[in-house]
Image (cartoon, rainbow, N blue to C red):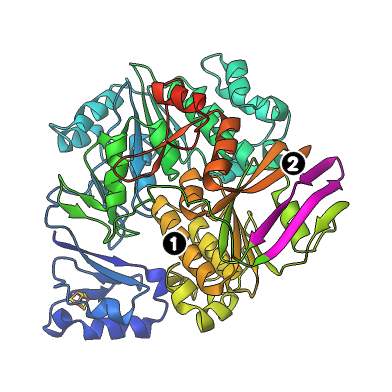
Amino acid sequence: MTRIAIVDNEKLKEMQQKLHIQSICPVNRTGRECIRIGEDGKLIIDELLCTGCGICPKAAPHAIKIINLPEELTTKPIHRYGENKFVLYSLPTPTFGRVTGILGVNGIGKSTAIKILASVLKPNLGDWTKHETDYDELISFFKGTEAQGFFENIKKGEIKVAYKPQQVELIPKTTKGKVVDLLKRVDEKNEFKKIADELELNEILNHEIAQISGGELQRVAIAATVLKQADLYIFDEPTSYLDIKQRINASRFIKSLINESNAVLVVEHDLVILDYIADLVNLMYGREDAYGIVSGVKPVRNGINVYLSGYIKEENVRFRDSTIKFAEKPPIKKKHTRESITSWKAVEKKLGNFKIKADEGSLHRNEIIGILGENGIGKTTFVKMLAGAIKQDKGEVSHKVKVSYKPQYLEASDELVVNVLNTAFRKYENQIINPLNIAPLSLKPLNELSGGELQRVAIANCLQQDADLYLLDEPSAYLDSEQRLLLSKAIRDFIEQKNASALIVDHDLLFIDYISDKLIVFEGRPAIEGKITGPFDMEDGMNKFLKELNITLRRDPETNRPRVNKLDSRLDREQKESGKYYYT
Ligand code: SF4
């Protein structure tokens, strides 16, 4: 097959439109049935007859995609969800004794691949009319590859899989009761106490699953997975909802699971964490919501660098037009000549049992400040004080600034995207709508958007407001690593053009490193006290924050991206001794 057609019939509601599309297809005009309307009223495209002329996708760009597959693609599909639906070619390969990462944009089939390996989804080898593929068929399909051995062992019952799903927020819908009961029920290793300690779950053991936060659910889901006796552990996005400290902790924990007789697979969009957790990586590329291909396995450093370069040399595939590069050095320390928009001095505020303190600091125009700190440590309270929405008990805030705020948790309603983003569509097409790729979502109601789509709309909504200071709380959540890097560029350009300023709270270190001019660091104890220091230059702020976490970062010599040093490695010790936790 040289091309595939993807049709979203949900978006083709009118029969008249379908008949029109059918009538303009040049192949249909010659009397053959390239486009037909099925008995159920759905529009169907025959991929073998289609010449790829491009007429029908132009007539219905939101519903039809005609895609030429790369010439190099000679393998048959592993799975197809249905006629004119998403198709997956090839699978990542778990390696025993190693952690293998999977890296790729959203909608490229990562979760599908993982479900197949976890035996949650039986692949149909591209024939969606079949109900079941038996293991013998799969084994012969993969003959001569590592996957052959994997499925042979699955068939013999010699590989048991434990799988942490991506959407932990759905767990309370199917699992009721207390955290402790759930964990004890799945504890096949008799390690309940040890794992609850390591993942810091002791304080919530008696809480109802329905009551715990996203970050707590994530750690409970990781614990429930590792308590099972398995040969292959699969973690689909294990760090969403976790702050940086928890991410590092969860990564160390997952890494420590590995031994010669098991394998770990991890899908992760935080590139610093993926780099830290994985030994090997499979890249996935293709076209969002259309098809996905898995690259050959690579050592993790090389794999992430190839991903940033956008070109897989061995397979001669370019999957992105541009290369993503990082600055060689942190922004140079300079005296700010920029106009100050607000400043604060010796501020204190008490809210119930929680109190925050901020030393002296100021924000300037055209500046992006990254905020680093744990969850529940007063970041929102501080910004509300800058906006004048809450009055401090002690100290001074020089003058109120007009703040536009994107909250951490996003609310969806049935309002259409185009109405919510009315100003952005009118005034900021090039600055907001295009870089955030909002146009394809314009006619969707908010409550039909995926997590990543809703996030992009919420960011656009924040930026379209008239303000001096834009506060974006966790803008990278739900976005894939590629979208995170594109987003940071869009925010930087927007802030510069508006001559405004932005505060970015995020837990993805690479994203913060890429976007920030300066850093504010929050320290203290969640829900008890928060201490705000900074803004610091990048080097000073990172040094302060990383010292707290007891990790050091170096720069990759090829791409300049930050990498976490192995604990107690030569570099780790040297950097700690010289106080250079950020990078040398
Ligand atoms: Fe027909 Fe294919 Fe052209 Fe669409 S792209 S009009 S299906 S030939």
Q: Which mark is residue 489?
A: 1
Tell me the residue at 49%/22% (across/down).
228
Along the line of sight, the residue nearer the viewer: 463 or 410: 463
Counting from the top left corner in percent of width and height, residue 205 is at 69, 27
**Mark 1 / mark 2, whichever is N-terminal:** 1
Residue where numbered disc 2 is placed: 530
Counting from the top left corner in percent of width and height, residue 10 is at 42, 70
Work out whether 165 lies above or below 161: below
Work out whether 120 lies above or below 254: below
Q: Would residue 278 be found to the left or right of residue 311 on screen?
A: right
The verdict on residue 354 being magenta is: yes
Tell me the residue at 34%/52% (across/down).
325
The verdict on residue 328 being magenta is: no
Q: Residues within 10 Å of mark 2 (few under 14, many from 20)?
A: many
Work out whether 63 lies above or below 310: below
Q: Quadrant of residue 260?
A: top left
Counting from the top left corner in percent of width and height, residue 91 is at 26, 40
Report the quarter where the N terminus lies. bottom left
Q: Would residue 29 be found to the left or right of residue 123 on screen?
A: left
Q: Specify the amino acid type for callout 2.
A: Gly
The quadrant of the rendered image in which ligand 1 is seen is: bottom left
Secondary structure, magenta segment, majority class: strand
Element under disc 1: helix
Q: Which mark is residue 287?
A: none
Q: What span is colored magenta in the figure? A: 341-363
- Tally of numbered discs: 2
Q: Specify the amino acid type for callout 1.
A: Lys
Camera sees residue 121: no
Report the quarter where the C terminus lies. top left
CB contact under 8 Å: marks 1 and 2 = no
Counting from the top left corner in percent of width and height, residue 124 is at 26, 46
